[in-house]
Image (cartoon, rainbow, N blue to C red):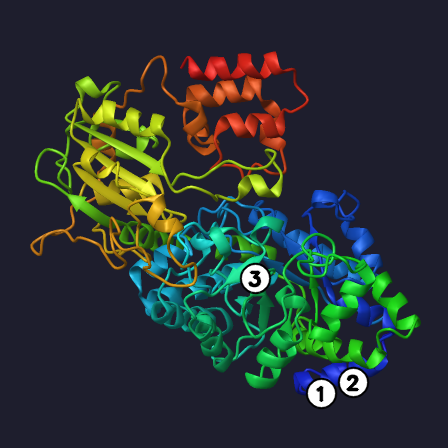
Amino acid sequence: MRDTTQHPYQDPTLAPAQRAEDLLARLPLEDKAGLMFQPLTVIGDFDAPGPIGYPSTRTLLERRINHFNTLQALSVREMAEWANAVQREIRERQPFAVPATISSDPRHAFGNNPGTGMAAGPFSQWPEQLGFGALDDPELTERFADTVRREYRAVGIALGLHPQIDLATDPRWSRAGGTYGQSVEVTKRLALAYVRGLQGVQLGPQSVAAMGKHFPGGGPQKDGEDPHFDYGREQVYPGGTWGMHLEPFEEVLDAGISQIMPYYGVPVGTEYDEVGFSFNAQIVNGLLRDKLGFDGIVCSDWGILSATPWGVEHLSFEQRMVKALEAGIDQFGGEARPDILLRLVAKGQVSEERINTSARRLLREKFTLGLFDEPLVDVERAELTVGTPEAKAAGMAAQAAAHALLTNHEGPAHLPLKKNINVYVEGMDPVALAGRANVVATPAEADVAVLRLAAPFEQRGVPGDLESFFHAGSLDFPADDIAHVAAISAQVPTVIDVYLDRAAVLSPLVPLASALVADFGASDEAFARVLFGEAAPQGKLPFELPSSMAEVEASRPDVPSDTPHPAFPFGHGLRYPDDWTPRPQPTETERAATTLARPRGGRYRLHRTSVGLLLKDPEAKVLLTEGLPQLFDHPMLNVSLGMDIETVTTMVAADLPAETRAAFLARLAAL
């Protein structure tokens, strides 16, 4: 039964630290241990199995766990009602009713990696963090973060597993899309603005707690690989830039950021022990706490005990836990085993005082965020707060502005394009050009071709496994992609837009494009506004674009702009003429008057066509509904919208006979 006696920790007039101290003295050890874990969970049925092997929500609650990381992007009502259900379950069944802290990776852009972020769903949609780096506008960044704050708190999310303030110094790194780019000065400016927007001047009941990551700076990854995986564990500093990568963290610590997450990586060739950062007492207790004075929460990256124990693989699960606690970790992200922590205390390997040190910090944040006093959200108000027309308009404007114009030659495809021309498109929904141009079915009929591409990567892992979502490896476009673009540009002047979630070698595309554009997360509508002069590209490259993989391989991973002959340097970005004025957006009458033709036969190159694009095509959606109905209820749909249909088909229909899958894909290819 719940303890209904009034205690000092229940008095909202007392300071959070005082309330935390009072509650800490009353909590049983089981409840303290439960505070120190933050697993993934699913929104919905408490008894449903958790994602990727995690226990159900009910099991987690029975273990006294009360920090939950959510991956799904369901409706606003579903998210808010689930958050309330969790809080009510705790209030009704747990004696001290320690409220839940619900957290989220970034969910306001276009990302489609369940290990790093997710697409916006019902939330307002903005460019990726790289897009904010391209704009380098602290005021805009703070307004965006304030929007995130309001929308998160409306559905019960009180902790943001962001900002990512690493420096994207190796062009190959698959996490570059979550950074502000390669510049330490830009990153410091925008990191401060983001933390202000999310937390306010100081953390309080209206705030979302920010978690800066990945201390002491991801980015200088050997060969550009990522330490989510064994082959990417090494962080190296051949350029001697350790201090530069640390600078953004020093800034946000001074600004009062609530939490810090160390990365998985192992520092190689430095003064520090060669073990993963969360196991490294010199890094967490020594550098972060003692030298930099941080007394907030340190949460490990997800799964360091069970999946990514780099440098301590030889230790048992229990020994890894002890080592991380001795290093200074307060909470284990992605883990759900407080029973093991309790066993370690019983065996005398971890003291209760050590548990108290972390539990005190975790309780203090819950009190500061107002979760003990107002754990429930107003569901009706949430539906009015999340994804408002104003927020969506601001996000769309930011998407458009963040485009970087790389080349813009004179001729029919000079940007901005003339209205009412004939356009052939690939990689975008023709509906986005309604009222702006007539979309034709072949390049031969067009005045201009418009091609939307994505930065290349090497597909790795088994479709649906975490590794399959990381865009890593070579930055070169495959030869067949270049040949395909060349065949179109030989027939008609061509505009090429490339979505950069990391760098790419664009050199082969430069001679094929009349205009070359980079985007950092932009809808077809946002891109169309830039194409036709309703908005201007204001972005500048947040990192250099190399001219060849040979130069990338010879560069130093910790040093920005370290290739000798970049195709485009950091900060490059052309502008529309000084006398440019924005055109009005098309009227409904203009939209209705244009022709929007789709090609017949070979409409899509399936290995390069995203599920999201197919779902916008009415004919393709019918085929998906008939041939792949399991797609629509698949738990990974939201994070798979940017993946090609061949990979997604393998992921969601692996149990279907190969010939059945082939027949389905053949029907799509015949469109």
Q: CA distance from mark 3 to mark 2?
A: 28 Å
Rate crowding at label 1 as few (under 14), some (14 to 19) or many (20 or more) other CA atoms within 10 Å.
some
User: Would you say the residues marked 1 and 3 are in contact, meaning their CB atoms lie under 8 Å apart?
Assistant: no
User: Would you say the residues marked 1 and 2 are in contact, meaning their CB atoms lie under 8 Å apart?
Assistant: yes
Rate crowding at label 3 as few (under 14), some (14 to 19) or many (20 or more) other CA atoms within 10 Å.
many
Residue 161 got which mark?
A: 3
Residue 22 got which mark?
A: 2
Coordinates of residue 520 in the picture (x, y in percent) = 36, 49
Q: CA distance from mark 1 to mark 3?
A: 26 Å
Residue 439 in sight from this viewpoint: no
Tell me which amino acid carries mark 3: Leu
Up-down: is 352 above or below 416? below
Tell me which amino acid carries mark 2: Asp
Residue 457 in sight from this viewpoint: yes
| Left or right position of 84 against 399 | right
Taking the spot 21% from the left edge, 35% from the top edge, the residue there is 495
Q: Which residue is mark 1?
A: 18
Mark 2 element type: helix
